[in-house]
Image: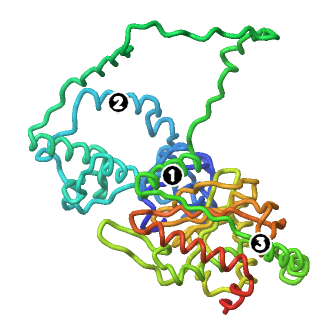
C-alpha cells in the first residue's frame, strides 16, 4: 500500500464466506487516506473466513480473510464470530481505561527501540496535543508501532518525574456583579407600541423519530475530517487575497474552446492556464513549493500540482507530475483524464501521491472567496473563485471587466507574508496578461 499508508478501511467485501474465488478475482475494496483500491485474490479456492467488517479500520499487514486452496482445511468463520461487536469492544475499552491506567514504562515490553516506532496520523496528533518528544516513547504495538497507551504512559512518567499529580479541577469563579458608580436610578427608555402586532405561530413538534437524521462518520468523509484537523493543528494558516483581471483570458478561451475540443478531445478550462501561471511563479518563489519538518526545509526542484476534484464520496486531489515542464495543451488533456478517473473511482495510489502544491476551484460552484486548508505536508494551497463582471478602473476610466478573486493559504512557519503576497501578485501578472504567460511556455 506504500510506505506512508499505515491503515485502511474495509469499504466492501466483493465475495461472501463460502464463495469460490479465482486468482486475480477482486476480494475486497479498501479505502486509505489517499485512494480507494480493489484487492485481488492471490490464489484460487474457497473463502472460508473474514476477520474484518465493512467500515472497520485495519492496520496494514493485518489478516482480514482466509482462503482454502485445497491444501489444508479451515473452519468457516463469519465476521460476527471472529470479532466482538463494535459496541461491546468500545465499552470494554472504555471500562479498561477507567479502571486501569497504562502500565509503567519499566513494566512494558518494547517491540522496537525507544524513539524508533512507527506512528499513525492519529498517534502523531496525540503526541502533538501532549507536547511529547517522540524520541522518548517506548513502542509496544504490533510490528513496532506506537500506540495511544504508549503516549499516555510517557506523559504520566514525565509528570511523575516532575512531581505533578492529578488533582480536583477548581470551580470557575463567580463573575462579579456589576455595580453602578453612583446610586442614582438609571432611566430605562419606554418600549414603543408597534402599529401591527405579529402573532408568533406555534407548530406541532415533529415526531421524535423524524426530528433528527443521524449517519455514521465513516469512509471518505471520516478520513477527510481527520486530514483537515491534522492540517490545521500542524500549520500556522494565513490566507491572502488578490482580485485578478481575467478579461483577456476569458476572451481568448471563448474564441478557442470549440476548436480545442474538436482537435484534442478535451474541454479547455481556465485551470491549465492557472497551473502554468503558478508553476512559473514558483520558480521565482520556491518556498511556496516546499515542505517543512521539525529540523529541515525541503525545497522541491519539481512541480507536482494537485488539483482538487469534487466527488459524491468526498474531495480527492489527483496530481499532475512535472506540470512545470508541460504545455497548456498537455495540461488540459491530462486534467480531463484525471478528472474522469477521479469521478469514476479509477484512480491508483500513484495518481494522488507526491503533490508539492495544490489548487482548488471553489468558483465552479459559484463561490467568490474561500480560505482553503493546506494539503499536508505541503505549505501552500491556491483557491480560485468564480469569474464575475465587475466595474474596474482601466486608464482612469471605469469599465466592465471579468474579475476573479484568488486566495492563497500558506504556512506562516515557513512563508512570510510578503513572499506570499508577491507570489500571488506574480500569478496575477501572468493571468491578466497572456503575452507574459506565453513567453514562459516551453
Residue 228's tag is: 1
Q: Is residue 174 left or right of residue 435?
A: left
Identify whether 159 is placed above or below 367. above
Q: Are marks 2 and 1 in contact (CB under 8 Å)?
A: no
Is residue 125 or residue 250 the one in the foreground?
250
Instruction: Looking at the image, tell me whether mark 2 or mark 1 is earlier in sequence order.
Output: 2
Is residue 270 visible to the viewer in this orientation of the structure? yes
The 10 Å Cα crowd at callout 2, few under 14, some 14 to 19, many 20 or more, is few
Instruction: Looking at the image, tell me whether mark 1 or mark 3 is earlier in sequence order.
Output: 1
Residue 349's tag is: none
The 10 Å Cα crowd at callout 1, few under 14, some 14 to 19, many 20 or more, is some
**Which residue is tagged 3?**
396
- Residue at x 77%, y 72% (from the top left corner): 396
Identify whether 411 is placed above or below 97. below
Residue 303's spot in the image, x, y percent? 55, 79
- Residue at x 63%, y 56% (from the top left corner): 315
Q: Is residue 384 left or right of residue 231?
A: right
Pair 3/2: label in front: 3
**Dot 2 lies on which element?**
helix
- Residue at x 37%, y 74% (from the top left corner): 297
Residue 369's spot in the image, x, y percent? 66, 55
Pair 2/1: label in front: 1
Q: What's the CA distance linking mark 3 and mark 2?
A: 69 Å
Is residue 76 or residue 368 the one in the foreground?
368
**Which residue is tagged 2?**
94
**Dot 3 lies on which element?**
loop
Is residue 435 or residue 131 the one in the foreground?
435
Location of the C terminus by quadrant is bottom right
Residue 34's spot in the image, x, y percent? 54, 61
**Dot 1 lies on which element?**
helix
Amino acid at each position: 500500500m506504500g510506505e506512508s499508508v499505515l491503515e485502511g478501511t474495509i469499504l466492501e467485501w466483493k465475495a461472501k464466506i463460502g464463495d469460490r474465488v479465482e486468482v486475480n478475482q477482486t476480494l475486497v475494496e479498501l479505502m486509505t487516506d489517499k485512494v480507494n483500491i480493489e484487492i485481488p485474490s492471490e490464489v484460487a479456492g474457497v473463502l472460508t473466513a473474514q476477520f474484518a467488517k465493512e467500515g472497520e479500520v485495519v492496520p496494514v499487514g493485518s489478516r482480514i480473510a482466509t482462503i482454502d486452496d485445497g491444501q489444508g482445511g479451515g473452519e468457516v468463520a463469519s465476521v460476527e464470530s471472529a470479532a466482538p461487536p463494535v459496541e461491546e469492544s468500545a465499552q470494554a475499552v472504555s471500562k479498561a481505561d477507567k479502571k486501569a491506567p497504562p502500565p509503567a514504562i519499566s513494566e512494558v515490553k518494547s517491540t522496537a527501540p525507544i524513539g524508533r516506532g512507527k506512528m499513525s496520523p492519529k498517534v502523531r496528533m496525540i503526541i502533538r496535543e501532549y507536547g511529547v518528544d517522540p524520541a522518548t516513547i517506548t513502542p509496544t504495538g504490533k510490528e513496532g508501532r506506537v500506540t495511544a497507551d504508549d503516549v499516555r504512559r510517557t506523559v504520566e512518567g514525565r509528570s511523575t518525574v516532575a512531581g505533578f499529580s492529578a488533582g480536583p479541577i477548581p470551580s470557575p469563579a463567580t463573575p462579579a456583579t456589576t455595580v453602578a458608580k453612583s446610586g442614582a436610578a438609571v432611566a430605562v427608555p419606554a418600549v414603543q407600541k408597534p402599529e401591527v402586532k405579529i402573532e408568533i405561530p406555534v407548530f406541532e413538534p415533529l415526531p421524535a423519530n423524524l426530528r433528527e437524521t443521524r449517519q455514521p462518520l465513516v469512509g471518505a468523509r471520516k478520513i477527510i475530517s481527520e486530514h483537515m484537523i491534522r492540517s490545521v493543528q500542524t500549520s500556522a494558516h494565513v490566507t491572502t487575497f488578490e482580485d485578478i483581471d481575467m478579461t483577456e483570458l476569458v476572451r481568448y478561451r471563448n474564441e478557442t474552446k470549440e476548436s480545442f475540443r474538436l482537435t484534442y478531445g478535451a474541454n479547455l478550462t481556465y485551470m491549465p492556464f492557472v497551473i502554468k501561471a503558478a508553476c512559473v511563479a514558483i520558480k521565482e518563489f520556491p518556498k511556496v513549493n516546499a515542505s517543512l519538518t521539525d529540523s529541515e526545509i525541503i525545497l522541491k526542484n519539481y512541480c507536482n500540482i494537485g488539483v482538487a476534484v469534487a466527488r459524491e464520496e468526498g474531495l480527492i486531489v489527483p496530481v499532475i507530475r512535472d506540470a512545470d515542464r508541460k504545455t497548456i495543451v498537455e495540461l488540459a488533456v491530462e486534467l480531463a483524464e484525471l478528472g474522469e478517473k477521479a469521478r469514476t473511482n479509477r484512480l491508483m495510489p500513484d495518481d494522488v501521491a507526491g503533490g508539492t502544491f495544490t489548487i482548488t476551484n471553489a468558483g465552479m460552484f459559484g463561490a467568490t472567496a474561500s480560505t482553503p486548508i493546506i494539503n499536508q505536508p505541503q505549505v501552500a494551497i491556491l483557491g480560485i473563485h468564480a469569474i464575475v463582471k465587475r466595474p474596474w478602473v482601466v486608464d482612469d476610466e471605469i469599465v466592465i471587466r471579468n474579475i476573479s478573486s484568488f486566495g492563497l493559504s500558506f504556512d506562516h512557519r515557513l512563508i512570510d507574508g510578503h513572499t506570499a503576497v508577491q507570489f500571488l501578485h506574480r500569478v496575477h501578472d501572468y493571468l491578466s496578461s497572456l503575452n507574459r504567460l506565453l513567453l514562459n511556455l516551453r
